Image (tube, coloured by chain):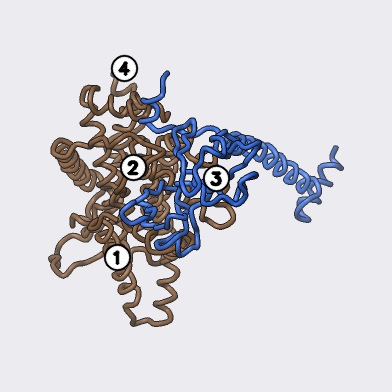
């Protein structure tokens, strides 16, 4: 008995069967590059899982050892600087891609019936991605890590009724202590990735069950095919996107390698301190209002974002010809962009 | 036996049976009790066992703090606290209200404030909170919320000044280097 036959008997999966299983017709508009913004964060997530596992071999999640272990990875371990930089840049690009993906879904109205639930799952995925970014830079135990974690814990404290409980749970005490960092590590390396994988499973299953919204552009030729095959056509496209991303990540990691800031000092907040760029808008918002007002208003904004498909449906029923939803979206994007640029432009 | 079978069949036709209801209740209750207990144990395991331990620490004899001046107290973790004596109300028995030990932790979101001598103010670099020399919020988010710098509790006993602070804190790297051992 040949090996191929032996294997086929146990794993009954031929090329034809694989084509049949994955043969989802993919709408022609997905050939436009900006419609691959959903697959891009997935690829970047895989890169982060891979590089994250490698970094975990040397990382030590304790306030006394964390900073030195990151310094060892960066300065001494072979290609440590490269892997850490790829991990960081993949996170940066993943967050950017998820935000752009969400904007694309918003402005093409792809969250409308019957895809409302998938939009809500997407909002959870965005939250998971941002929390992964935040917990990631908390692990380095540089100044930004410590003060970022302290501020985040105190933001959590502002949540009505359960804030105090959540803060103590997050920090394992009233304030940052010896046992805090391992909690951020477990969140970053186990709980949040597991949650993200589970949500991603639901997200992709719903896409497969509902299919992708079909769009036609004026520039499309009349006789161009409406669909193409997932396997192998779309898969090959995704592989090309993956290769381009890997080249981009390597270039960024080499030209702009991640550095190591000053070690955390629990007794001294630096003169100028800023979070990562994706929290600039939030950080500026916190400077404008009292903590309670800022946190409650941010919670309200996230809640509106979560329920947006239902709110949009109400708007369209009440004012069928209005472009209110689009204008609200443009206002939100411009608002977040302005706060981000404002925070980036000034020291305080 | 045949009679019993007929009896069961008769109950099935009438809808939910007492046996079915009991079975569902016991099964559901068992699952909730079993996994619920496990969840409670996991939650209790993760929740911090005790609140931050605070203790009273000796600062200095009361007479060592000059009236209208201040001394700096350094806690075991390296945290420096400025203790000011504003007046001498009663020369024989100094009053606690004469002393003030301002915390340098911003009441907004927990960053450390900086003393800016050129402006005679405390400034929080995180979210631009500003406090006057007495610790009162002047501008920024703390002023909006009416949050001033908090004060450490002080105590006078037999002419000695004590301060209550957290017993354990993560120390500063500069303090670790300076400390022997």
Q: Residue B73: where, in percent of width, then height?
A: 48, 37
Residue B47 shows in the view: no
- Which one is closest to the eye, mark 1 or mark 4? 1
Asked if A326 appears above or below B45 in the picture, the reply is below
Q: Do the residues at discs 1 and 3 belong to one chain?
A: no
Q: Quadrant of the C terminus of chain B?
A: top left
Residue beneath label 4, please?
A: A1
Please tell me which residue is depicted at 41% across the width and 46% down the height of the picture: B112
Tag on residue B152?
3
- Which one is closest to the eye, mark 1 or mark 3? 3
Tag on residue A333?
1
Crowd band around label 2 with a 10 angstrom C-alpha radius: few (<14), some (14–19), many (20+): many
Circle 3 SS class: loop
Q: Residue A168: where, in percent of width, then height?
A: 55, 43
Please tell me which of labels 1 and 4 falls first in the chain. Answer: 4
Query: Do labels 1 and 4 touch, CB within 8 Å?
Result: no
Who is closer to the viewer here, B43 or B39? Answer: B43
């Amino acid at each position: 008995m040949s090996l191929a036959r032996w294997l086929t008997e146990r794993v009954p999966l031929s090329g034809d069967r694989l084509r049949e299983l994955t043969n989802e017709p993919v709408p022609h508009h997905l050939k436009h590059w900006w419609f691959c913004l959903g697959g891009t964060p997935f690829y970047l997530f895989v890169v982060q899982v891979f590089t994250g596992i490698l970094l975990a071999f040397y990382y030590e999640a304790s306030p006394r050892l964390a900073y030195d272990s990151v310094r060892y990875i960066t300065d001494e371990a072979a290609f440590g600087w490269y892997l850490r930089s790829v991990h960081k840049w993949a996170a940066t690009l993943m967050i950017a891609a998820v935000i752009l993906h969400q904007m694309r879904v918003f402005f093409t109205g792809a969250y409308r019936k019957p895809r409302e639930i998938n939009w809500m799952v997407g909002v959870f995925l965005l939250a998971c991605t941002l929390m992964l970014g935040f917990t990631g830079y908390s692990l380095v135990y540089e100044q930004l890590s410590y003060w970022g974690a302290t501020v985040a814990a105190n933001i959590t404290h502002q949540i009505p009724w359960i804030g105090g409980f959540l803060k103590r749970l997050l920090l394992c005490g009233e304030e940052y202590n010896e046992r805090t960092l391992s909690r951020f590590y477990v969140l970053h390396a186990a709980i949040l990735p597991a949650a993200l994988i589970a949500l991603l499973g639901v997200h992709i299953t719903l896409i497969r069950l509902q299919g992708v919204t079909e769009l036609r552009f004026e520039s499309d030729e009349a006789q161009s095919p409406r669909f193409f095959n997932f396997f192998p056509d779309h898969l090959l496209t995704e592989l090309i996107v993956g290769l381009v991303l890997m080249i981009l990540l390597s270039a960024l990691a080499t030209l702009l390698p991640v550095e190591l800031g000053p070690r955390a000092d629990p007794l001294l907040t630096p003169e100028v301190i800023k979070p990562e760029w994706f929290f600039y808008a939030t950080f500026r918002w916190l400077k404008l209002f009292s903590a309670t007002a800022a946190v409650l208003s941010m919670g309200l904004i996230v809640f509106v974002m979560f329920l947006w498909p239902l709110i949009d449906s109400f708007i369209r029923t009440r004012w069928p010809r209005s472009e209110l939803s689009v204008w609200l979206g443009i206002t939100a994007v411009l608002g977040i962009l302005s706060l981000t640029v404002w925070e980036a432009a000034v020291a305080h | 036996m045949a009679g019993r079978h007929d009896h069961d069949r008769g109950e099935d036709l009438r809808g939910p049976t007492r046996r079915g209801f009991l079975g569902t209740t016991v099964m559901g209750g068992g699952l909730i009790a079993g996994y619920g207990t496990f969840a409670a144990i996991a939650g209790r395991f993760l929740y911090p066992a005790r609140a931050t331990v605070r203790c009273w620490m000796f600062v200095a004899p009361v007479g060592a703090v000059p009236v209208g001046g201040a001394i700096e107290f350094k806690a075991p973790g390296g945290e420096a606290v400025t203790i000011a004596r504003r007046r001498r109300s009663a020369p024989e028995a100094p009053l606690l209200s004469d002393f003030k030990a301002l915390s340098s932790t911003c009441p907004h979101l927990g960053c450390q404030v900086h003393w800016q001598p050129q402006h005679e103010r405390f400034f929080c670099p995180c979210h631009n909170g500003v406090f006057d020399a007495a610790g009162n919020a002047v501008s920024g988010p703390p002023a909006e919320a009416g949050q001033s710098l908090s004060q450490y509790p002080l105590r006078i006993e037999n002419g000695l000044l004590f301060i209550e602070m957290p017993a354990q804190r993560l120390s500063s790297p500069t303090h670790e280097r300076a400390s022997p051992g």
